[in-house]
Amino acid sequence: MRQRGDIGGMMRITPEIGPLGAPFWRAAGEGRVVAQHCATCDTHQHPPLPQCASCGTSDLSWAELPQEGTLYAYTVVTHATHVAFADRVPYVIGLVDVVPGVRMLALIEAEPSELRIGMPLHAVYRTFSDEAALVCFSK
């Protein structure tokens, strides 16, 4: 992640967007969830890799995924791990199962008391540049 700009006296952090992950970030900026799909073994994977994690082929493309997922696990962050997050604590980070093979780490926009493992969540997007957004999930 790189530090970028200043928002109301607070530093903002944005992900480094390299060529491998650029399609993911662009899709999120368009309000879509995508992951790599392997045509050889018909699996999805995230985060993006140069080869299929299941069969090793490089026959990968990008596939649009559902806007919904299931909460697999979560934690409540109660101390800022970076000055840019100081005004957000406490906040929730979770693992969300979107499709088999795709478990996304994301900010969960809900009160911790409202969360239950296995509950349905839907994708929401938080823009951080003209071309990209973070995929977050909400109840």
Image (cartoon, rainbow, N blue to C red):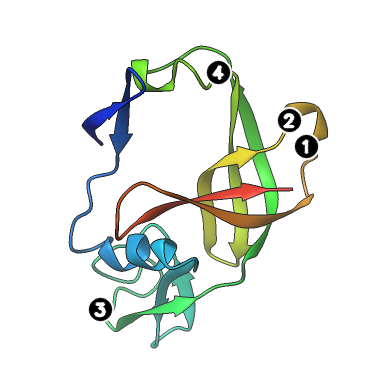
- Check disc 2 and report the residue beneath it: 111
Mark 4 / mark 2, whichever is N-terminal: 4
Give the residue displayed 36% in from the left and 64% down from the top: 24
Front tag of 4 and 3 = 4
Residue 115 image label? 1
Front tag of 4 and 1 = 4
Residue closest to the far left: 19
- Check disc 3 and report the residue beneath it: 58
Mark 1 / mark 3, whichever is N-terminal: 3
At label 4, the amino acid type is Val
Front tag of 2 and 1 = 2
At label 3, the amino acid type is Ser
Relative to 58, is 89 above or below?
above
Residue closest to the far top: 79
- Residue 13: x and y in percent read 30, 33
- Check disc 4 and report the residue beneath it: 89
Mark 4 / mark 1, whichever is N-terminal: 4
Which image quadrant for residue 116? top right
- Disc 3 element: loop
- Look at the numbered discs 3 and 2 and tell me whether their residues touch, using CB distance below 8 Å: no
State the residue in front, 25 or 129: 129
Front tag of 1 and 3 = 1
- Residue 93: x and y in percent read 56, 34
Give the residue displayed 81% in from the left and 27% down from the top: 113
- Look at the numbered discs 2 and 1 and tell me whether their residues touch, using CB distance below 8 Å: yes
- Disc 4 element: loop
Give the residue displayed 45% in from the left and 15% down from the top: 86
- Look at the numbered discs 4 and 1 and tell me whether their residues touch, using CB distance below 8 Å: no
